[in-house]
Image (cartoon, rainbow, N blue to C red):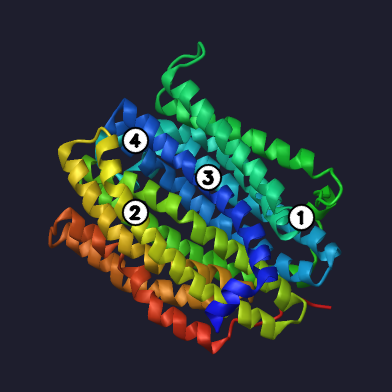
Amino acid sequence: MILHDIFHDRRFNRKLLALTLPITLQQLMLALVAAADALMLGRLDQYSMAAVSLATQVQFIQNMFLAAIAWGVGVLGAQYWGKNDKKVLDELFGLSIRESLLISLPFFAGCFFFPEKLMRIFAEDPRLIQLGAGYLRVASWSYLITGISQCYLAVMRISEQQRMSAWISSGAVVLNIIFNAVFIYGLAGCPAMGIAGAAVATIIARVVELFWCILISFKAGFFQLKLRMLFHIKWLLELDFWKCCLPITGSFMIWGVGFTSYTAIMGQLGADAAAANAVAAVVRDLLCCVCNGIAGACSIIIGNELGAGNLELGKKYGDRLVVISFIIGISTTVIILALTPLLTSLLPLTAQAKEYMTGMLIIMAFYMIGRCVCTVTINGVFYSGGDAIFDVVSLTVCMWGIALPCAFSGAFYFHWPVLVIYACTCLDEIGKIPWVLIHHRSYKWVRNLTRD
């Protein structure tokens, strides 16, 4: 019955496709920046690639906070958009910008003033620490403005301007990649800056992205930031926003710090393991774009229906999207297994690093089934009704209770092989699948979050 609905409900499929494609493109283009950094810096030397991969874990943590705010806007905003209450959306937009600025300032200060101390969390090799600290000090300026543009893009996605949101973020990524080549290698008469060049390219791209967001917001049909909303506090909306956002923030931080801990553990296993893990992370992030796009799309689609009071239809759409998540996960497994020989031959890694990379990609291929199912079901279906507490509990148990202790003890006490330790870091997503499906069928996530 569900498969029949998936293939025959044209209205649902058109809406899902119309939302998924721009969000997936957005996710893909963002992942391409990391891929471009890895490939371009990898052409310089293995240390440069590994150092930037480790350094960007700081921004990864910041992005968890910013993503939680954007998701909070998406979840609550999608329901109010379904209810056709644009006044509340104006207030929600101002609230999100204010909170993003408060989060971005400490990250800027830490990366600018104490980059070496931050790098020591992720690596013990002095050369990796020195190179990564140089990147962080320059890139820190981009951390100040990233959150503002992400709020603009989040509001565009829920207000049926997702194509423009995708164009803006994709355009910024293309600029980032172009300037990466220019400043890393010293093209077009510019001096070759190496790692610092990658950081400068990031700053330029973020400035252009924010300027474009502000400029386009003056057009009809777009939400324009009203400066008074930055200082206007509506306590009921603030309460609703943080009731929605705090569990998402908690789940993103638990996941983000856990994922960063995985990277830190792999970074402590030597330059070969760090380099192989950097490549595997880029492949994972690129192929996660589809499930991230579907998760973002389904949170908007189901959120619109829940906010409009169509709870049964929202429940029906949730069932379909769980099935779709399995289809995407299995397809991704096949793609990774097919790409592994090509990637091994392309990158100029040491023989040991290539051996590690091949094993990591094979392990990751099967991990991606769990990753796709959990991302779509939790971040898409459950979040659409404001149900993020389940994510907090499942991450605490599966990641922090099982996967991280296994990886940590294997690396520092039992001295297991690198690939066994990497497999431990993949346990959490696979282990969550039965739990996720049981919670989905309870339908506790089916809730209308709006107020009159």
**Residue 416 position within the rendered picture, expressed as x and y whole percent measured from the top left:** 14, 59
Residue hosting label 4: 49
Point 45% across, 17% down: residue? 186
Between circles 3 and 2, the one closer to the viewer is 2
Q: Which amino acid does label 1 sit on?
A: Gly
- The reply to whether the C-beta atoms of the residues labelled 3 and 1 are less than 8 Å apart is no
Counting residues from the start of the chain, the first of labels 3 and 1 encountered is: 3
| Image position of 234 (left or right of 200) | right
- Helix or strand or loop: what does disc 2 sit on? helix
Counting residues from the start of the chain, the first of labels 3 and 4 encountered is: 3
Q: What residue type is labelled 2?
A: Ile
Between circles 3 and 1, the one closer to the viewer is 3
Residue 8 image-quadrant placement: bottom right
- Helix or strand or loop: what does disc 4 sit on? helix
- Helix or strand or loop: what does disc 3 sit on? helix
Q: What residue type is labelled 3?
A: Leu
Q: In which quarter of the image is the N terminus?
A: bottom right
Using the image, tell me which numbered label, if any, was put on residue 30.
Answer: 3
Between circles 1 and 2, the one closer to the viewer is 2
- The reply to whether the C-beta atoms of the residues labelled 1 and 2 are less than 8 Å apart is no
Specify whether residue 260 is in view.
yes
Q: In which quarter of the image is the C terminus?
A: bottom right
**Residue 342 position within the rendered picture, expressed as x and y whole percent measured from the top left:** 29, 42
Q: Distance between the residues labelled 3 and 1?
A: 25 Å
